[in-house]
């Protein structure tokens, strides 16, 4: 069964600290993996996409990694800011024409 | 602003009411989607339209009725809903169907009393 599991479910960190969010998937065949950020009261916004051949990709303070062999991805946030408080959703695309598989998300709270 | 606008932002309705959710995209995309987001659950795909034709209906109860009059507008008509239908309803669009980047609206927070 195609599944996406995210951990932790929620996380609280102090402003300025780093954190890493995890995404494990069982989707096969695999096409790509996206990380979305969803602010409270808003829809999700794409942060980055990882394809099969990519291991690491950065978008400002966000760095995503992908290990296609172990079917794991991580999102590392450096020097967190209050505006990073949001839900982070991992979405995996399988074979073309099939539905996207969504994780439940990780809720990150950054406090001052 | 993602280019996808949803109205209303909040909606409270009784189980016997009829209401409609509206979505408009200004991105020139060919595919539009309705998703349901409930607490502690992954987003659930409800309907997909590609070039104004419905291409997917994920076993959604008939009390939800979608309509896509043109490539820029998408509606979700609601009638005789149940309290368990209370959720955030998100509209999204993408350039084409498939493994594409989704652009989401801000959603309609629906409460069924």
Image: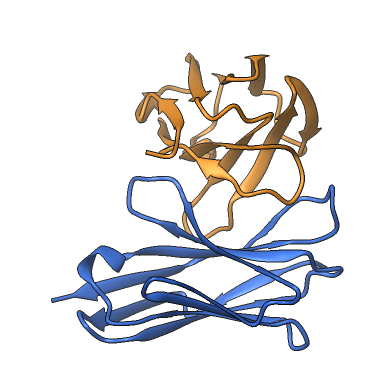
Q: Which residue lies at the image location 44% right of the left edge and 84% below the top edge?
A: A20
Q: Tell me: residue B7, above or below residue A45.
A: above
Q: Give above or below for B37 relative to A36.
A: above
Quadrant of the drawing holding the N terminus of chain A: bottom right
Residue nearest the viewer, comparing A30 with A62: A62
Q: Position of residue B105 (x, y in %)?
A: 46, 37
Give chain B's shade. orange
What scheme was used to colour the molecule? by chain
Residue B74, horizontal then vertical, whole percent: 59, 21
Q: Tell me what residue is drawn at x 23 percent, y 72 percent.
A: A81
Q: Is residue A103 visible?
A: no
Q: Nearer the viewer, residue B57 or B102?
A: B102
Residue A69 position within the rendered picture, expressed as x and y whole percent measured from the top left: 78, 87
Q: Quadrant of residue A39?
A: bottom left
Q: Is residue A98 visible?
A: yes
User: Quick check: B85 above or below B99?
Assistant: above
x and y percentages locating residue A8 in the rendered image? 47, 80
Q: How many marks?
A: 0
Compared to A16, does B2 lie above or below? above
* Figure colour of chain A: blue
In percent of the image, x 37 and y 45: which residue is there?
A: A42
Q: Give the residue drawn at x 41%, y 39%.
A: B106
Quadrant occupied by the C terminus of chain A: bottom left
């Amino acid at each position: 069964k195609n599944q996406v599991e995210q951990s932790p479910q929620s996380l609280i960190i102090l402003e300025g600290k780093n954190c890493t969010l995890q995404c494990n998937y069982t989707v096969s065949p695999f096409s790509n993996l996206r990380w979305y950020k969803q602010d409270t009261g808003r829809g999700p916004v794409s942060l980055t996409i990882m394809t099969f051949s990519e291991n690491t990709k950065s978008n400002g303070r966000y760095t995503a990694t992908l290990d296609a062999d172990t079917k794991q991805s991580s999102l590392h946030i450096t020097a967190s800011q209050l505006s990073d408080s949001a839900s982070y959703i991992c979405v995996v695309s399988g074979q073309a024409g099939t539905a996207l598989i969504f994780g439940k998300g990780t809720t990150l709270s950054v406090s001052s | 602003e993602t280019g996808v606008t949803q109205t209303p932002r909040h909606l409270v309705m009784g189980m016997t009411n009829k209401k409609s959710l509206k979505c408009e995209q200004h991105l020139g995309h060919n595919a539009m989607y309705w998703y349901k987001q409930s607490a502690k659950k992954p987003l659930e795909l409800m309907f997909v339209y590609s070039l104004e034709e419905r291409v997917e209906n994920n076993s959604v109860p008939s009390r939800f009725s979608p309509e896509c009059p043109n490539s820029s507008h998408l509606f979700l008509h609601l009638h005789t809903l149940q309290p368990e239908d209370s959720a955030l309803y998100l509209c999204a669009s993408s350039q084409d169907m498939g493994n594409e980047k989704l652009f989401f609206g801000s959603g309609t927070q629906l409460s069924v009393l």
